């Protein structure tokens, strides 16, 4: 019987996905574990592997098109199988899906017959927002002895790849999710128990618990997006590698084209990258003549007076950024306060601090430290709004806006007020570095009470930011500018920096915001006060 494959939820914030590229076309034979397509989420472009075997009978979303999660992505079945019923009934199914159904009685794990000593391990929830996980690598195979604390597998969430340890000892009797496959939280990941134990039907029955609930709720087929069956075939120079292998290669600066994959169909795995000998001869690239290089580098000729446009489809990250910032701007009444700060003393202090061996502090670190101290003196700035009450946070967790390739992330320095300047500097460098390689843990981007955004390194003198809700304020930090200033009635050369505070007027009145900026200015202009 044909299987309907729907657009997967590959991140906790994903509401729709974009098919970046189809690696299979209608009529191709599909094996379990084959890569069907590359799907772009709001966080990354990820390979989507098939959980089923058969023939690709239908493609529901063309390459380059977007669709909500659970939309029909593809249908896999037997060659020549009639799928007209699945396609024609999709509209009726979509309507039925919107109809409320009676809540089904919950099934319990107790109904599953599990032999003594056998433990069913399910896909763990590695963050409070995780709904789906992908097994990047299995470090054990069926038949291996597993000790408590052994690493079973590396599991990818939408934000990080994490090692998953076993809390049980025994023999690995069953693997339910193969490498590269994704599955919802609580899906059967593995079974551990005494060697030789008969576990026939355990995984199947365990899986039927949720299926029984779903069946009693009268599930319907996912809606079909009416699109053509035409798909984009992969280019001949495509490199097949697991997501983890790609990340490790990127971190180590290794060219994947130099590695021979040992995985299925020549796929490059984590171990292939780790065992790669950098001195080995590289795979020869196709020869390109000088004239060809010149032509490739040249910009397309645009006749004078001709209107030329280019359409770039929005990535999922850009869509999420647009949605959240629009919600913030249109729900929170923003206003901005700006103050000019002398940086002469800060520059002298930073030079002295950085003269200490193994110490590196940036001006941004000094601003963050000053913010943390000022927030303790003005806790109303460190607040958040809801309809029932204003919550004042007496702990200080500062989010630091970091630009990444596809957008913006905000890792969080927890209890910033208790950190020294050098600790803040080390913490920011660590978080920013891992943010750019997508190695941040989910909880490292949660819980901020105030945000700092710095565009000074790009030469931006002054700007206003949109509040990172549920925070009530965000500080925009500009560049340090050398210019004439008046000191003691004399015009001298000085160094100044503009700071702009965007506030939510529901929680912060103008005078409160102004007092915070005055305190912040005092700390920055007198760095010795931050060492007390």
Image (cartoon, rainbow, N blue to C red):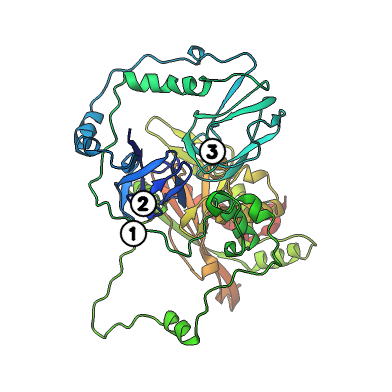
Q: Nearer the viewer, residue 208 or 510?
A: 208
* Dot placed on the residue nearer the N-terminal end, 3 or 1: 3
Q: Give the residue at mark 3.
A: 178
At x 68%, y 47%, the residue is 419
* Dot placed on the residue nearer the N-terminal end, 1 or 2: 2
At x 39%, y 47%, the residue is 29
Task: Inspect this view and state whether residue 509 appears.
Answer: yes
- Check the image and report above or below for 88 versus 255: above
Residue 191 coordinates in the image, percent (x, y) = 59, 26
The local crowd at label 2, few if under 14, some if 14 to 19, many if 20 or more residues have their Cα within 10 Å, is many
Residue 401 coordinates in the image, percent (x, y) = 52, 54
- Check the image and report above or below for 89 versus 365: above
Q: How many marks?
A: 3
* Dot placed on the residue nearer the N-terminal end, 2 or 3: 2
Residue 383 coordinates in the image, percent (x, y) = 49, 40
Q: Is residue 135 left or right of residue 362?
A: left
Element assignment for label 2:
strand
At x 32%, y 36%, the residue is 2
The local crowd at label 1, few if under 14, some if 14 to 19, many if 20 or more residues have their Cα within 10 Å, is few
Q: Give the residue at mark 2.
A: 18
Image depth: mark 3 or mark 1 in front: 3
- State the CA–CA distance, disc 1 to disc 2: 9 Å
Element assignment for label 1:
loop
- Check the image and report above or below for 486 versus 327: below
At x 32%, y 83%, the residue is 301
Q: Find out whether the residues at labels 1 and 2 contact each other: C-beta distance under 8 Å.
A: yes
Which numbered disc covers residue 313? Answer: 1
Q: Find out whether the residues at labels 2 and 3 contact each other: C-beta distance under 8 Å.
A: no
Residue 367 coordinates in the image, percent (x, y) = 60, 57
Q: Nearer the viewer, residue 386 or 85?
A: 85
Residue 529's image quarter?
A: bottom right
């Amino acid at each position: 019987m044909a299987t309907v494959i729907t657009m997967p939820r590959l991140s906790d914030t994903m509401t729709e996905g974009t098919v970046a590229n189809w690696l299979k076309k209608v009529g191709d034979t599909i094996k379990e574990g084959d890569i069907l397509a590359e799907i772009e989420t709001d966080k990354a472009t990820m390979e989507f592997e098939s959980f089923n075997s058969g023939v690709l009978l239908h493609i529901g979303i063309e390459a380059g098109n977007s669709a909500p999660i659970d939309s029909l992505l593809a249908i896999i079945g037997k060659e020549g199988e009639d799928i007209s019923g699945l396609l024609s009934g999709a509209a009726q199914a979509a309507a039925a899906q919107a109809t409320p159904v009676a809540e089904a009685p919950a099934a319990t794990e107790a109904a599953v017959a599990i032999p003594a000593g056998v433990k069913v391990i399910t896909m763990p929830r590695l963050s409070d927002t995780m709904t789906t996980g992908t097994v990047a690598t299995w470090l054990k195979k069926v038949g291996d002895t597993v000790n408590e604390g052994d690493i079973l597998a590396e599991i990818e969430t939408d934000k990080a790849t994490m090692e998953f340890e076993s809390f049980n000892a025994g023999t690995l009797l069953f693997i339910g999710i193969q490498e590269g496959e994704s599955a919802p939280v609580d899906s059967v990941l593995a079974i551990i128990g005494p060697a030789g134990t008969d576990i026939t039907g355990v995984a199947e029955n365990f899986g039927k618990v949720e299926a029984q609930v779903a069946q009693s709720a009268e599930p319907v087929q996912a809606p079909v997006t009416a699109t053509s069956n035409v798909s984009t075939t992969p280019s001949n120079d495509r490199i097949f590698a697991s997501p983890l292998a790609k990340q490790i290669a990127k971190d180590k600066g290794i060219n994947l084209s130099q590695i021979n994959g040992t995985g299925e169909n020549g796929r490059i795995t984590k171990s292939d990258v780790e065992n790669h000998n950098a001195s080995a001869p590289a795979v020869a690239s196709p020869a390109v003549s000088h004239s060809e290089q010149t032509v490739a580098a040249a910009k397309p000729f645009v006749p004078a007076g001709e209107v030329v446009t280019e359409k770039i489809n929005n990535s999922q990250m850009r869509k999420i950024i647009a949605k959240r910032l629009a919600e913030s701007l249109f729900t929170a009444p923003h206003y901005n306060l700006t103050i000019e700060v002398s940086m002469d003393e800060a520059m002298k202090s930073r030079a002295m601090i950085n003269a200490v061996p193994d110490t590196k502090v940036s001006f941004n670190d000094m601003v963050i430290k000053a913010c943390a101290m000022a927030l303790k003196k003005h806790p109303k700035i460190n607040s958040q709004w809801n309809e029932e009450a204003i919550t004042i946070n007496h702990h200080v967790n500062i989010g630091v806006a970091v630009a990444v390739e596809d957008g913006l992330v905000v890792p969080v320095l927890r209890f910033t007020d208790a950190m020294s300047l050098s600790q803040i500097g080390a913490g920011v460098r660590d978080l920013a570095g891992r943010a750019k390689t997508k190695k941040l843990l989910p909880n490292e981007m949660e819980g901020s009470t105030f945000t700092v955004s710095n565009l000074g390194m790009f030469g931006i003198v002054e700007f206003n930011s949109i509040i990172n809700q549920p925070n009530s304020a965000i500080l925009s930090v500009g560049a340090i500018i050398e210019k004439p200033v008046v000191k003691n009635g004399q015009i001298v050369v000085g160094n100044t920096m503009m700071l702009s505070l965007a506030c939510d007027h529901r929680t912060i009145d103008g005078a409160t915001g102004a007092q915070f900026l005055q305190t912040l200015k005092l700390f920055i202009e007198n760095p010795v006060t931050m060492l007390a």
